[in-house]
Amino acid sequence: MLSRKGYSQELAEKARRENFPVASRLLPRRHRDHLMAVYGFARSVDDVGDEEPPGDRLRLLDEFEADLARLYDGQAARLRPVRALARTVMECSIPAEPFRRLIEANRRDQSVTRYETFDDLLGYCELSANPVGRLVLHVFGEVSEPRLALSDRVCSALQIIEHCQDVGEDHRRGRVYLPQEDLRRAGCPAGHLAAPATSAQLRAVVAVQAARAAKLLNEGEAIVASLAGFARTAVAGYVAGGHATLAALDGARYDVLGRAVRPRRLRLLTAWARVLMTTRPSDAALQRLPSA
């Protein structure tokens, strides 16, 4: 078992591989610590759902849920990622539901390996991605119904973008997050997802998902204008990570099997600056945000 320091170092390394700045050093230490606690839980649950022996995954996910219940009952948690949440949950008044949804997403991954339509995939994002944005808003004390609706758009977009990047890796795990109806429409059989090179048909399907993600991201970007201070900085970074990764996918011509498509740091920083400069913080902006 990793020491506390070893766990923190491993978690920081995983965070560096994400498309967006998980807990930027532009933020105060208290916010960074809370964001890393949330990320540590989400990352650990995902690792159980993806990397543990298949026969053990549901049992281990049940252990996470039971430990989460202990935490919310005021008892000492046993698992390190859950223990690390204790101060964050208390200081930020975070409800248990978003954490439970992340566990449920990984349970679903053990039995549902295909999604027929894009709407079906968005239903999965409600469990696997949207809770993370809601947790971030709790960390900054910026929760409201309009913001939650816009956060869901951003997080669904980021999840779909990641699915575009990880087509080959997901397929090796027995999962396909590209909608089946889109694959059929493009004449892209399952074998194309296991090929060493990205076929024209598969590139076309990935491009469609990227365009859908871009639409969601553009709609969700309005949340940045409703925020100020460190919350605005952090959320702008997440939005910028989505834009930078979409640009990287486009630059690679959606060749997601022949290379690892990741945004360059300069591209991310440029997108971050653009989002901050083009979305002025305003109380009135929140009133104009659409509801879910």
Image (tube, rainbow, N blue to C red):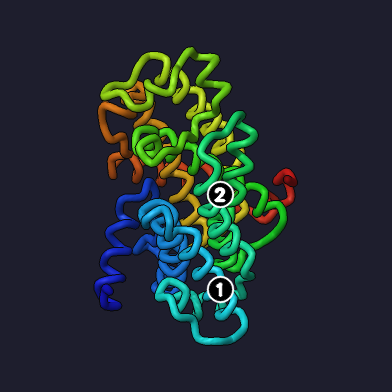
Asked if residue 150 is positioned above or below residue 28 in the image, the reply reads: above
The answer to which quarter of the image holds residue 164 is top left
Above or below — where is 232 with respect to 265? below
Residue at the image point whose x is 30% and y is 23% from the top = 195
Q: Residue at x 65, y 53 (%)?
A: 147
Instruction: Tell me, for residue 66, which label it has, or none.
Output: 1
Q: Which residue is mark 2?
A: 108
Q: Does label 2 or label 1 sit earlier along the sequence?
A: 1
Q: Is residue 165 visible?
A: no
Apparent side of residue 210 relative to residue 146 in the rendered image (left or right): left
Q: Quadrant of the N terminus?
A: bottom left
Q: Is residue 172 left or right of residue 184?
A: left
Q: Residue at x 42, y 71 (%)?
A: 81
Expressed as whole percent of the image width and height from the top left, the position of residue 291 reads: 74, 46
Give how far across and how far down residue 207 sits, in percent: 46, 23
Front in this rendered view, residue 197 or 34: 197
At 44% from the left and 18% from the top, the residue drawn is: 189
Residue type (three-letter) at the residue carrying disc 1: Ala
Image quadrant of residue 121? top right
Amino acid at the residue labelled 2: Arg
Q: Residues within 10 Å of mark 1 (few under 14, many from 20)?
A: few
- Whether residue 260 is visible, yes or no, is yes
- Residue 276 percent across, percent down from the top left: 47, 48
Residue closest to the eye, 233 or 84: 84
Question: At numbered mark 2, what does the secondary structure look like: helix, strand or loop?
Answer: helix
Badge 1 marks a residue whose secondary structure is helix
Answer few, some or many: residues within 10 Å of disc 2's Cα (few below 14, many 20 plus, some between 14 and 19).
some
- Calculate the distance from the C-alpha at mark 2 to the C-alpha at mark 1: 18 Å
Vertical side of 217 occupied by 286: above or below: below
Furthest toward the front, the residue is 55
